Amino acid sequence: MRKTMRRGLASLLGITLLGGLGVATAAPAQAAASDCPKGYFCAWKTEDTTGTMFKTNKSLPTLGTWNNTFRSQINRSSKFACLYDLPNYELGTYWSLDPNEDPRGYDIVPNPHTSSVGLVATERECGGDAYPTWYAETSPKAAGFGDLNGDRKADVLVRDKAGRLWYLPGGFTGTLVGAGGWNGMNALVRHGDFSRDGKEDVIAREASTGRLWLYPGTGTGGLGARKLIGAGGWNGMSQIAAVGDLSRDGRADLLAVEKATGRLWLYPGTASGTLGARKLIGSGGWNSMNALTGPGDTNGDGRVDVYAREASTGKLWMYPGTTSGGLGARKLVGTGGWNVMGTFLSVGDFTGDGKPDLATIARRPILEPEHADELRTYRGLGTGALAAWDYTDGNWWGLNGAF
């Protein structure tokens, strides 16, 4: 048996719950946890799941005679069950139960406290939006990347754990642009216009096939019908990064690290919106890097650069682009500690000074667990280096990627 754990206090204003008003129904006396049908949340007034059973497969803003009576419960629905101590999902304390709980066990509630039940796609939605907040200042110039709607504000795409894709345009709002299925991708990158229509695109690697897909941007933050640009074999790459025009031919390119050899390959963009024959720009050793990202022109020389994180040291290195379409001698821009970062967001200038910046999302560190899933922003100095992080947002938990 699992004792219900309290998640904590949260503001529930503006919550969006899936489904309409449900109906609690009664089952025969002496029901058991295994009697809860698949697809439902169930509860009992006893601690041993005996007696009349409450069940619902929809969100319920009030519970009628079942208010504050749940003593044992189980969630066999495919959604997170959010249990609120106030009706109408209002501000207060809530608890959440994972989807598809094992019917051989159930949760005991020593002190009944539930007045409304919400069934939602992600745990985040128990206490707010499925997406985090993102804000960007307007840049004085268009960067050519990191801006899906062309308003000169750096924007972000986030994938939630339900496999949906959300567009964050930089003004604390979010829009659903992918209704589902995105969890089937094990790499998601973007940096400029690959399809040659003047709008930023997304490139995704399909985990089950190793295929590479191009999703053309619509210019409004959405994505059009996908196009196959890599027939297979891309699962052989340990890192994939969209970096902009490294080859100096006016087209966006892709970098990939070959898992078996540690070689770094440049895949140039073509006039038809596909990828051309690859070119070796790193003969080996790149498996020592466990993150690769294209921040744009960080040192002001007119050529795009690359940031790479060294796995063994946690150092962050800047590799400047060269006139010949390769990478020059690296420069240390982060002396250590960067292994705590799970995601690197290279979306251009979000501080409004015309220089590309960097944002990161911390993963769950051992020494500082209070900083897990925290967004940190680093202002670009225009020299290839970064200022100390100067902003944090702890609301980036419960996601499955951001780019």
Image (tube, rainbow, N blue to C red):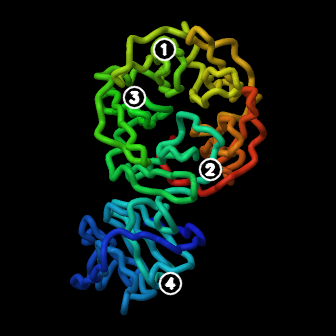
For label 2, the residue is 136
Q: Amino acid at mark 4?
A: Leu
Please tell me which residue is depicted at 69% across the width and 52% down the height of the picture: 392
For label 3, the residue is 196
For label 1, the residue is 265
N-terminal-most mark, 4 or 1 = 4
Q: Nearer the viewer, residue 252 or 100?
A: 252
Q: Amino acid at mark 1?
A: Trp
**Label 3 neighbourhood size at 10 Å, few (<14), some (14-19), many (20+)?**
some
In this rendering, position of residue 330 left or right of residue 294:
right
Please tell me which residue is depicted at 57% across the width and 57% down the height of the picture: 171
Place of residue 206 in the rendered image (x, y in percent of width and height, measured from the top left): 34, 33
Against 366, residue 130 (above or below) is: below
Q: Nearer the viewer, residue 342 or 68?
A: 342
Q: CA distance from mark 1 to mark 3?
A: 22 Å
Which secondary structure, mark 3?
loop
Place of residue 237 in the rendered image (x, y in percent of width and height, measured from the top left): 44, 21
Residue 401 visible in the displayed image:
no
**Label 1 neighbourhood size at 10 Å, few (<14), some (14-19), many (20+)?**
many
Q: CA distance from mark 3 to mark 2?
A: 26 Å
Against 148, residue 39 (above or below) is: below
Which secondary structure, mark 2?
loop
Q: Residue furthest bottom?
A: 65
Q: CA distance from mark 1 to mark 2?
A: 32 Å
Q: Quadrant of the N terminus?
A: bottom left
Residue 119 visible in the displayed image:
yes
Figure label count: 4
Q: Nearer the viewer, mark 4 or mark 2?
A: 2
